[in-house]
Amino acid sequence: MEGKHIMLISVWGNINSGKSLFSTVMGRILADSGKRTLIIYAGLQSNDTPCFYPDEREMVSMGNLWQMDLDDDEMLKYMMATEKDNLAYLTYSPGENIYSYPVFTKYNIVNVLSRLSSFFEYIIVDCSSDLNGGVITLTALEMSDRVIRLMGSSGKAWLYFAANLPMISDSRFNLGSHICVLSDIMSAEAAEVYEKSYENILYRLYHDEKIYQAYLEGQLMHNAGSKYEDMVKKIIAENICSEIKLSGKKKELKAKKPIKKETIKKEKEKVDRENKKRKIGIFKRKEEESDGRYDE
């Protein structure tokens, strides 16, 4: 990824941590800001890209893309377009599984990712939770400029990371630089307990009915006006692309009227009276608390 303003981003986490949702919303936000963006949905199990792009009737599988040394025109045939001019994605076709293609090699994956960087400014890899069979995921985690780690606030999620983090503890994965997010927090979950357990949480993503409804309706390509999207923007702006503008209304500055001297004098006398009452109240409380005695 050298020589160009190109960033490879991996979104990784436990099962049901919201990786695909986060990747899709992040890709849309970057595309809306004018950035040429590609999302790679690397997970074969429970591939829910048809839910994100329900209008697409014929999804082209990216399976063969990682097997052959293709020229640029051939590579473009595997990319799926979206209604956003700056956003495309790669995915598997519905019904495919781990036996649909031979095992991918790291060499071919590195080659494809490097070639794709000539078309896009940002490449987002929606990683698989299964590190054992996820060569694309492992390669992306190693190559990425940023890794966003989504961590669920449940015992099952905690056990997932206890078992899988040692698998990528090698220095080339640079675990210390991961952007850790406590993800899809439900109101009944003990978020504080797991946040202390993980120790390195930087952001919180709460379960949001607006974004969940947009997912169910296949409307993730449109801003749902949710707090979830606001937090994704914040994560992007602070770690990936500072050009992303955070939502929020600016307060209008009104011209101040000149203050009369009489008004200042009255306000000062009022403050003095309030301070005097406050001091008397403090001393009285101290006397009551210390049985008639107080220490200065």
Image (cartoon, grey):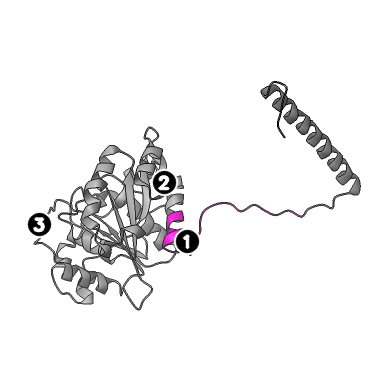
User: Are circles 1 and 2 on residues that touch, CB within 8 Å?
Assistant: no
Q: Residues within 10 Å of mark 2 (few under 14, many from 20)?
A: some
Task: Residue 285 in the image: state x and y as whole percent.
Answer: 71, 26
Q: Earlier in the sequence, mark 3 or mark 1?
A: 3
Figure quadrant of residue 153: top left
| Label 3: which secondary element | loop
Question: Which mark is on residue 100?
Answer: 3
Q: Nearer the viewer, mark 1 or mark 2?
A: 2
Q: CA distance from mark 1 to mark 2?
A: 19 Å
How many numbered discs, if any? 3
**Mark number for residue 277?**
none
Which quarter of the rendering shows the C terminus? Answer: top right
Q: Which residue is outermost to the bottom?
A: 3
Which residue bears the numbered disc 2?
204
Which is the main secondary structure of the residues drawn in magenta? loop
Q: Amino acid at mark 2?
A: Arg
Q: Secondary structure at mark 1?
A: loop
Q: Which residue was labeled with disc 1? A: 244
Does the rendering let one see residue 85?
Answer: yes
Vertical placement of residue 171 versus 189, above or below: below
Residue at screen point 55% across, 52% down: 248
Q: Tell me which segment is drawn in magenta.
A: 234-255
Q: Earlier in the sequence, mark 1 or mark 2?
A: 2
Q: Is residue 237 magenta?
A: yes
